[in-house]
Image: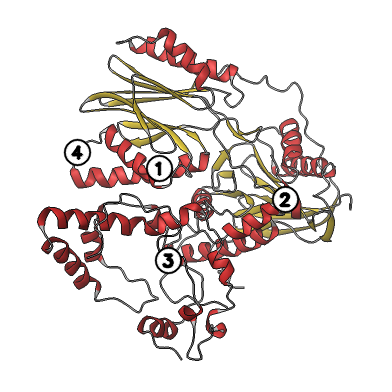
């Protein structure tokens, strides 16, 4: 039984690494983590930023979640769309969101999008791309509407329209064709919807519905399911089984009580 | 979707959401590649009275993780002086898996439970802690592709506990019959606000 | 004086830093590895390549601190880093036994950790660690006493 002689440090734990390498050499392949495949799009219009995303997440070639939310809150005026490994985007988003909250408490000011960007890029660079999160950050701060992208290794872009994910090729075609400066709000929303639908229909890693978020000065509109081009028809008949059709060997029932004794076995 | 690691020890798990109830089910096989070593290895663990957690994948990691989660749930109860809620438990397990982001545990956990207002909740996670919350069903393990097929066909929303039991049992049995690495019996727990009913199913023993 | 390195990130060469392991580091007073207290040991496993990130993350914080101190030395003179290290030294003196977690608010403030949160703060929390600990063995290890 090994004893530890110093306080263990927090952070990531690499204990299983050699075991996992040995298992892989025996021929057991590592399971694939859930990726978001995805098409995420951001554009700047006259008074703000529109972010759009599809809602499919995949594990290999299986659809893991038909309706996941990829546009996540980062600050009251900053939202982030994530592509890449889903767990990494979730945890990166949570961590940076907490850091921004502490930053707001310390400075007493509204968050700037470039602050969020700097925190994300420094963190991703530290992990050398092993944390595979490609994010689009969009928001409205004191400098106006702002749209920024971070790639998994930490490189960043500041552009008036951006796409990320496996469906980015399809979406960028729509944007290159029709984006122009100072679009109106509804025109911008329609353009984003078309770009995401191009990704949904042409890319296998993207699918289901279109979610849109519009960020303007002082207000944010989150529209889940703005377009639902892939609604399933309701089933024509019910496939319920008659009660008692499953053969059981035994049955036991436990009544749920309040304040149970703690499990100390 | 299921990799060779899932088939090394075998095993499949499934959870479904019904009307004010949830059901969680698993097979009972424990094997090593093509050899079956045990037939009493259900992969469902009780987290609290109203939350159950099921894990499929490498058996050693299932056991290690289930003990670690039990420890964390007990510490939570000591510190917070209340039972843990399903969403909190889900993110606690996700953080535990993410701690090993670069040298993961090979498990796919599912969580099924009722929160303090008896609202049902199910979710599943991949091996590094990406939480996927749905309101129909979640699957994991060696037969997960087959399970997705049977559940997608047989599931309908707002099933009563007795009907939910039938649907989840038939989905599990049908899928597991077509998967060599899972089987040898099944256990189903149906959680309602008043009781938890556990049934062992009669299945093919191969 | 050692070279004043302005490294922003830890070096990725496996040669730099300590990649040599010896029996002496875990030896008891007989000069052999202390299996009773520490369990069996395989030096091969300790030297096998670990995940490429592990070394980088281990040395990250120290590299950033060194960068800051080196810059201070170059800009302000030797007194600046000496004062900083002295302050850190003073506030680190009062702590619990080496193996018990002790919160050190003053040290957190000096290191700038009171206004931010990192993965280290909520993943693998040392207070929830499940490894067995022996207070006496850890004190002996800290003081270099071998029995």
> Which quadrant of the view contains residue A136?
top left
| 10 Å crowding of disc 1: few (<14), some (14-19), many (20+) | many
Of residues B104 and B24, the one nearer the viewer is B104
Q: Where C42 falls versus A81 (above or below)?
A: below
Name the subunit of mark 2: A
Q: Nearer the viewer, residue C52 or B121?
A: C52
User: Where residue A39 appears, x then y in whole percent?
Assistant: 51, 24
Judge depth for marks 1 and 4 and give the one in front: 1
Density class for disc 3 (Cα within 10 Å; few <14, some 14-19, many ≥20) is few
Quadrant where the image shows the N terminus of chain A: bottom right
Spatial CA distance of label 2 from label 4 is 54 Å
Q: Secondary structure at mark 4?
A: loop
Q: Mark 1 or 2, which is nearer the eye?
A: 2
Spot occupied by residue A81 in the image (x, y as percentages of width and height): 43, 31
Q: Which residue is mark 1?
A: A124
Q: Residue furthest right?
A: B205
Q: Secondary structure at mark 3?
A: loop
- Sequence order check, earlier mark of 1 and 2: 2
Relative height, residue A104 to residue B77 (above, below):
above
């Amino acid at each position: 039984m090994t004893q530890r002689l110093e306080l263990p440090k927090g952070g990531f734990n690499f204990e299983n690494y050699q075991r996992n390498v040995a298992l892989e050499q025996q021929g057991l392949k590592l399971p694939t983590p859930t990726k978001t495949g995805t098409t995420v799009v951001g554009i700047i219009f006259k008074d703000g930023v529109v972010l759009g995303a599809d809602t499919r997440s995949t594990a290999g070639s299986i659809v893991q979640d038909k309706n996941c939310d990829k546009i996540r809150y980062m600050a009251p005026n900053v939202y982030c769309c994530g592509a890449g490994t889903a767990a990494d985007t979730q945890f990166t988003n949570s961590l940076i969101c907490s850091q921004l909250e502490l930053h707001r408490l310390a400075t007493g000011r509204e968050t700037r999008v470039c602050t969020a960007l700097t925190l994300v890029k420094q963190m991703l660079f530290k992990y050398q791309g092993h944390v595979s999160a490609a994010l689009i950050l969009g928001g409205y701060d004191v400098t106006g509407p702002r749209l920024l992208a971070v790639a998994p290794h930490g490189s960043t872009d500041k552009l008036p329209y951006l796409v990320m994910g496996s469906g980015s090729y399809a979406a960028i075609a729509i944007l290159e064709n029709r984006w122009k400066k100072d679009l109106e709000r509804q025109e911008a929303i329609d353009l984003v919807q078309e770009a995401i639908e191009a990704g949904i229909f042409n890319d296998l890693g993207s699918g289901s519905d279109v979610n849109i978020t519009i960020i303007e000065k002082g207000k944010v509109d989150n529209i889940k399911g703005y377009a639902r081009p892939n609604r399933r028809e309701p089933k024509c008949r019910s496939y319920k089984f008659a009660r008692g059709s499953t053969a059981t060997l035994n049955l036991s029932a436990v009544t749920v009580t309040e304040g149970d004794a703690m499990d100390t076995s | 979707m299921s990799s060779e690691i899932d088939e090394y020890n075998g095993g499949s798990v499934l959870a479904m959401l019904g009307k004010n109830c949830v059901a969680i089910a698993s097979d009972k096989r424990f094997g090593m590649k093509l050899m079956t070593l045990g037939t009493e290895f259900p992969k469902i663990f009780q987290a609290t009275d109203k939350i159950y957690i099921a894990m499929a994948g490498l058996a050693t990691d299932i056991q290690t993780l289930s003990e670690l989660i039990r420890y964390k749930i007990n510490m939570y109860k000591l510190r917070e002086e209340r039972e843990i809620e399903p969403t909190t438990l889900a993110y606690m397990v996700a953080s535990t898996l993410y701690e090993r982001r670069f040298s993961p545990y090979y498990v796919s956990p599912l969580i099924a439970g009722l929160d303090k207002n008896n609202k049902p909740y199910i979710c599943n996670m991949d091996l590094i802690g990406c939480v996927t919350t749905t309101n129909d069903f979640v699957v994991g393990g060696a037969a997960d592709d087959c399970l997705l097929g049977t559940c997608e066909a047989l599931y309908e929303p707002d099933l009563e506990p007795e009907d939910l039991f039938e649907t989840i049992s038939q989905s599990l049995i049908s899928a597991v019959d077509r998967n060599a690495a899972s089987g040898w019996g099944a256990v189903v727990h149906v959680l309602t606000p008043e009781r938890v009913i556990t049934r062992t199913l009669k299945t093919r023993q191969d | 004086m050692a070279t004043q390195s302005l490294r922003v990130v830890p070096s990725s060469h496996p040669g730099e830093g300590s990649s040599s392991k010896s029996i002496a580091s875990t030896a008891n007073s007989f000069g052999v590895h202390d299996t009773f207290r520490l369990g069996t040991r395989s030096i091969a496993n300790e030297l096998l390549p670990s995940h490429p990130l592990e070394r980088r993350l281990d040395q990250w914080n120290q590299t950033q601190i060194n960068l800051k101190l080196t810059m201070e030395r170059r800009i302000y003179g030797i007194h600046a880093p000496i004062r900083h290290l002295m302050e850190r030294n003073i506030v680190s003196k009062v702590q619990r036994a080496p193996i018990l977690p002790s919160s050190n608010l003053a040290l957190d403030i000096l290191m700038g950790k009171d206004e931010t949160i990192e993965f280290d703060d909520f993943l693998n929390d040392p207070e929830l660690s499940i490894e067995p600990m022996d207070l006496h063995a850890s004190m002996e290890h800290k003081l270099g006493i071998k029995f």
